[in-house]
Image: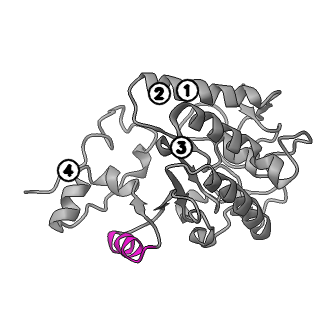
């Protein structure tokens, strides 16, 4: 079974190239979310034992934590659903568990307030209300950083409603408008559709402390060297290989992107 806050299946097609009929399964409601908190705490202990330098809580992209935040996926009537504070409870308690193990300076969190991915998203006023509270509470814990994912169109796949209308779930807005730093020492990272010039300006202007790249790193395994030497970037990214193989060759899209000539 797939756990979730409520028995609500996500809309949309199947993930990757998994066999079977398209569509998401109906999740099994989690009986006691404290069990999830304890699982995160145990995972943090194991990560520390394994020699990692820190941990990041994935609280975006329609993940389990994000589902609890979003009332379109969370219809619980207990202390884990309903009000903004209740819907934020799981993410906050998981962060406390991670910080308990690692200390705040070794724990970060990733958020995607614009939603869309994996069929999550609330109207803008509710989104702002939820994430304003959530980020304020997170900042009070003084984690190492808060990583904010901007609206990325290709992550907001169209879905069909029961009336056969096609729509998108994402809620585009300025994620940097959230007060994710003051008065906390927490660093602010920005992610999502950045180019190098834009990232450099955001950092130099003091808007963010760091920029995070995903797709650019995939297509440019030597991204750091290219940036330092001002070498043009490879823009040929094969989306088919993000979560799957092509022609049963695991190297395709994983270890075959070329490095720049010296």
- Looking at the rendered image, the disc whose residue lies closer to the viewer, 3 or 1, is 3
| Residue contact at pointers 1 and 2, CB within 8 angstroms | yes
Residue 71 showing in the rendered view: no
Q: Main secondary structure of the magenta part?
A: helix
- Looking at the rendered image, the disc whose residue lies closer to the viewer, 3 or 2, is 3
What residue is shown with label 1? Answer: 43
- Along the line of sight, the residue nearer the viewer: 45 or 67: 45
Rounded to the nearest angstrom, the CA distance separating label 3 from label 1 is: 16 Å
| Residue at image coords 75%, 69% | 124
Q: Is residue 197 magenta?
A: yes
Q: Tag on residue 258?
A: 4
Q: Position of residue 113 (x, y in %)?
A: 64, 60
| Residue at image coords 61%, 50% | 60
Q: At numbered mark 2, what does the secondary structure look like: helix, strand or loop? A: helix
Left or right: 218 as drawn, with respect to 30: left
Q: At numbered mark 4, what does the secondary structure look like: helix, strand or loop? A: loop
- Callout 4 crowding tier (Cα within 10 Å): few <14, some 14–19, many ≥20: few
Q: At numbered mark 3, what does the secondary structure look like: helix, strand or loop? A: helix
Query: Considering only order in the chain, which callout, 1 or 3, is on the residue closer to the N terminus?
Result: 1
Rounded to the nearest angstrom, the CA distance separating label 2 from label 4 is: 32 Å
Q: Tag on residue 104?
A: 3
- Along the line of sight, the residue nearer the viewer: 172 or 239: 172
- Callout 2 crowding tier (Cα within 10 Å): few <14, some 14–19, many ≥20: some
What residue is shown with label 2? Answer: 47
Q: Tag on residue 9?
A: none
Rounded to the nearest angstrom, the CA distance separating label 1 from label 4 is: 35 Å
| Residue contact at pointers 3 and 2, CB within 8 angstroms | no
Q: Position of residue 12 (x, y in %)?
A: 69, 49
Rounded to the nearest angstrom, the CA distance separating label 3 from label 4 is: 38 Å
Q: Which residues are magenta?
A: 196-206
């Amino acid at each position: 079974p797939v756990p979730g806050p409520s028995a609500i299946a996500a809309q949309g097609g199947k993930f990757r190239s998994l066999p079977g009929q398209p569509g998401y399964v109906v999740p099994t409601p989690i009986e006691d979310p404290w069990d999830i908190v304890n699982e995160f705490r145990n995972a943090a202990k194991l990560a520390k034992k394994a020699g990692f330098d820190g941990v990041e809580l994935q609280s975006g992209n329609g993940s389990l934590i994000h589902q609890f935040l979003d009332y379109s996926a969370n219809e619980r009537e207990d202390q884990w659903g309903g009000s903004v504070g209740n819907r934020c409870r799981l993410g906050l308690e998981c962060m406390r568990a991670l910080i308990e193990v690692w200390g705040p300076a070794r724990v970060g969190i990733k958020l995607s307030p614009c939603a869309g991915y994996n069929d999550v998203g609330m109207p803008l006023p509710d989104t702002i209300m939820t994430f304003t509270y959530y980020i304020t509470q997170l900042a009070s814990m003084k984690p190492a950083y808060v990583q904010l994912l901007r609206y990325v169109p290709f992550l907001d796949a169209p879905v069909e409603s029961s009336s056969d209308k096609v729509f998108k779930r994402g809620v585009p807005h300025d994620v940097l408008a959230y007060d994710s730093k003051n008065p906390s020492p927490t660093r602010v990272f920005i992610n999502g559709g950045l180019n190098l010039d834009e990232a450099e300006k955001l950092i130099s202007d003091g808007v963010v402390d760091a920029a995070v790249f995903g797709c650019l790193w995939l297509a440019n395994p030597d991204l750091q060297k290219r940036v330092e030497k001002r070498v043009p970037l490879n823009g040929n990214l094969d989306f088919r290989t993000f979560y799957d193989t092509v022609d049963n060759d695991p190297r395709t899209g994983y270890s075959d992107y070329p490095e720049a000539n010296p």
